[in-house]
Amino acid sequence: MAGHEFSEPADRERQVADPTATPRAAEEPRHSCDPAFQHGVVVGFDGSTSSERALAYAIGMAHRSGSGLIIVHVANRLPTTVWAGCEPPVFVDVPDHRTEVLGLELACAEYLTEVPWILVERGGDICHELEEVGREYSADAIVVGSTHGIVGRIFGSVAGRLARRAQRPVVVIP
């Protein structure tokens, strides 16, 4: 199957809250995501070798469990400072267009024909965003590749930070 991106139809009417209704509990999951991907497998993907190995494992995991695959790319937001005379500097996020390139590569990949999948773009802290997507989709697991090198040793690896704070199983692929 090809990848899909789901958005709200423009002509869909918004529901108005009933002031006489009992408020819902805060613990109830949001159901704004496509139900076909509920209880799927979330995988962090940035095109690196370790994320490609994680994607391959996640595809097999989703295929064996008969669930969907939620591929998450957390885009790099490059902070830039804009100085406007005497006013304090303003920080502007410069979007990373790598998600579009990754989406095209994934859409052409034959190995993704085994499972239904979607590509979700987020911006921000990688660990937080992966866990947030996992929560939104009630994912059964989050799969990430391991980080090698000096940067991971200095700042801590994404896999290690995610494994410590996640509310669902985290599979780290070497």
Image (tube, rainbow, N blue to C red):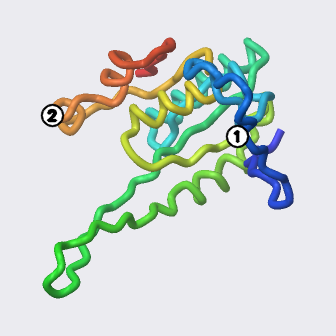
Q: Residue at x 22, y 84 (%)?
A: 84
Tell me if residue 47 can be seen.
no
Q: Where is residue 144 in the image (x, y as percent from the top left)?
A: 47, 27
User: Is residue 14 or residue 1 the one in the foreground?
Assistant: 14
Left or right: residue 77 versus residue 149 is: right
Tell me if residue 157 can be seen.
yes
Left or right: residue 142 versus residue 68 is: left
Q: Which residue is drawn at 52% across and 27% down?
A: 54
Q: Which mark is residue 154?
A: 2
| Disc 1 crowd, CA 10 A, few/some/many (<14, 14-19, 20+) | many
User: Is residue 114 or residue 125 the one in the foreground?
Assistant: 125
Q: What residue type is labelled 2?
A: Ile
Q: Which mark is residue 29?
A: none
**Cα–Cα gap, marks 1 and 2:** 33 Å
Vertical arrangement, residue 150 with respect to residue 57, above or below: below
Vertical arrangement, residue 24 with respect to residue 2, above or below: above
**Circle 1 residue:** 118
Contact, mark 1 vs mark 2 (Cβ under 8 Å): no
Q: Residue at x 69, y 22 (%)?
A: 22
Q: Which of marks 1 and 2 is nearer the N terminus?
A: 1
The image quadrant that residue 174 belongs to is top left
Vertical arrangement, residue 43 with respect to residue 2, above or below: above
Q: Which amino acid does label 1 sit on?
A: Ile
